[in-house]
Amino acid sequence: MTKKMMKDALLELLETKALEKITVTDICEKADVNRSTFYSYYEDISQLLLEIENDVLNNLPAFPDSSLADSDEIFLATLVKFFDYVKGNDRLFRVLIVQRNSSEFNHRLVNYVMERYRKPTASADKTADRYAYVYCVSGAIGILKEWVNGNFPMSTRDFAQIVMNISAKVIS
């Protein structure tokens, strides 16, 4: 419970302040905990933020086995689950990918998706193949930012369909 209070406090502070301007005292005051309590869990604010980011990645919906991912229906359903998770955790994603716009977290998110979804291909040019996937995933995260920042102007299914259609054009 204490760790959750500190995580919530940091997220709330990140809504209005840059990470570099936030102090341990700010977090402790907002979470109503002592500094010694903070330091019993974390070495510094960066470690707390890293734990929040790890929680996000660890709780993302599972991607299907790559052998099943050939089905457009399964891919669409997977994207819908992923975007439902984002929408259900809008404050968290708004802070992490829109307001903070951390290239480090975005890179970790791209790698997570690449590791769990990327289909093996028979392509002779593995480098070009990887670049195409990175391009798709990075682009999807870019439009995800727009979707979150715009307060989810369309359903997760409609948004997933757009992402799927764009990705199919690049990877085909």
Image (cartoon, rainbow, N blue to C red):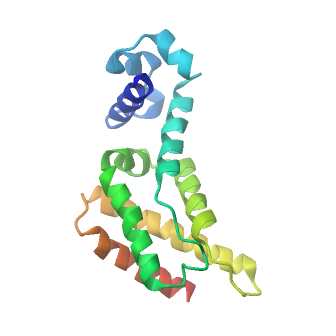
**Quadrant of the rendered structure where residue 22 is?**
top left
Rendering coords of residue 116 (x, y %): 59, 65
**Quadrant of the rendered structure where residue 50 is?**
top right
Q: Does residue 114 sit above or below 97 in this rendering?
A: below
User: 153 left or right of 30?
Assistant: left
User: 129 left or right of 55?
Assistant: right
Rendering coords of residue 31 (x, y %): 35, 21
**Residue sitting at 37 percent across and 45 percent down?**
92
- Which residue ends up furthest to the right in the rendered image? 124
Please count the marks in the image.
0
* Relative depth, front residue between 169 and 88: 88
* Relative depth, front residue between 16 and 44: 44
User: 130 left or right of 135?
Assistant: right
Point out the image quarter for the N terminus: top left
Point out the image quarter for the C terminus: bottom right
**Residue sitting at 53 percent across and 84 percent down?**
170
Q: Does residue 138 sit above or below 43 in this rendering?
A: below
Q: Does residue 159 sit above or below 86 in this rendering?
A: below
Rendering coords of residue 28 (x, y %): 40, 17
**Quadrant of the rendered structure where residue 41 is?**
top right
Rendering coords of residue 158 (x, y %): 29, 75
* Relative depth, front residue between 92 and 67: 67
**Residue sitting at 49 percent across and 17 percent down?**
38
**Residue sitting at 41 percent across and 34 percent down?**
18
